């Protein structure tokens, strides 16, 4: 039995959006807790991503993935990790720009978002190193290359 339940919401559709099964497998691999939990993963367009990014982060543009960890009220214990909102057009554009296979970038965004739901972040350099190392290890276990390799070989501008 799966330790992670995924509520999958596909409100944006095109041929490069991975299957629900693939997204579920990637999310489950990135769920590091031993306890069962639930996550909602919503695939959206630029408009919805932009609106949410503006409302919650003050940035008036769409973004690849938004993570909304569930914060239970005091005394309430429910097995909810939170919500991931992934903007398909942004993920697809980034994959093209970074010359990555679409599935590899999608897997990275799911893993990245799932780690955020578990409290990982990349604000401080040392935290970013921990999070990136986890992403690299988990993606490798899923059969994907290091997503940061191409970025590290590019000259700084």
Image (tube, rainbow, N blue to C red):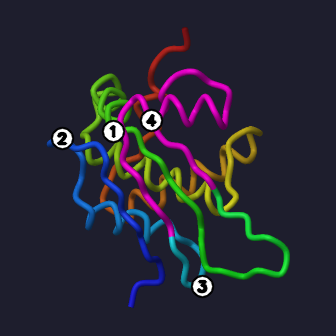
Judged left or right of residue 108, residue 100 is: left
Q: CA distance from mark 2 to mark 3?
A: 34 Å
Residue with the mark numbered 1 = 88
Residue with the mark numbered 3 = 35
* Nearer the camera: disc 2 or disc 3: 2
| Between discs 2 and 4, the one toward the N terminus | 2
- Quadrant in which residue 102 is drawn: top left
Element type at mark 4: helix
The spot of residue 74 in percent (x, y) is 85, 74
Q: Residues within 10 Å of mark 2 (few under 14, many from 20)?
A: few
Magenta stretch bounds: 39-68
* Nearer the camera: disc 3 or disc 4: 4
| Between discs 3 and 4, the one toward the N terminus | 3
Q: Residues within 10 Å of mark 4 (few under 14, many from 20)?
A: some
* Nearer the camera: disc 2 or disc 4: 4
Judged left or right of residue 23, residue 16 is: left
Q: Residue at x 45, y 25 (%)?
A: 153
| Between discs 3 and 1, the one toward the N terminus | 3
Element type at mark 3: loop
The spot of residue 55 in percent (x, y) is 64, 33
Residue 14: numbered disc = 2
Element type at mark 2: loop
Residue with the mark numbered 4 = 48
Q: CA distance from mark 2 to mark 1?
A: 9 Å
Q: Residue at x 32, y 31 (%)?
A: 89
The answer to whether the residue labelled 2 contacts the one labelled 1, judged by CB atoms less than 8 Å apart, is yes
* Nearer the camera: disc 1 or disc 4: 4
The spot of residue 157 in percent (x, y) is 55, 8
Q: CA distance from mark 3 to mark 1?
A: 29 Å
Element type at mark 1: helix
Between 148 and 23, the one nearer to me in the picture: 23
Q: Is residue 55 above or below residue 11?
A: above
């Amino acid at each position: 039995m799966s330790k992670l339940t995924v509520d999958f919401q596909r409100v944006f559709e095109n041929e490069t959006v991975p299957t629900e099964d693939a997204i579920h497998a990637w999310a489950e691999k990135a769920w590091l807790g031993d306890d069962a939990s639930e996550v909602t993963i919503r695939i959206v367009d630029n408009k919805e991503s932009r609106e949410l990014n503006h409302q919650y982060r003050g940035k008036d543009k769409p973004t690849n993935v938004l993570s909304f960890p569930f914060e239970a009220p005091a005394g309430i214990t429910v097995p909810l990790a939170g919500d991931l909102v992934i903007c398909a057009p942004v993920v697809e554009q980034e994959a093209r720009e970074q010359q990555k296979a679409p599935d590899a970038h999608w897997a990275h965004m799911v893993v990245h978002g799932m780690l955020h739901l578990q409290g990982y972040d990349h604000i401080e350099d040392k935290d970013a190193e921990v999070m990136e190392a986890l992403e690299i290890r988990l993606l490798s276990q899923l059969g994907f290359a290091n997503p940061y390799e191409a970025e590290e070989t590019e000259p700084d501008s």
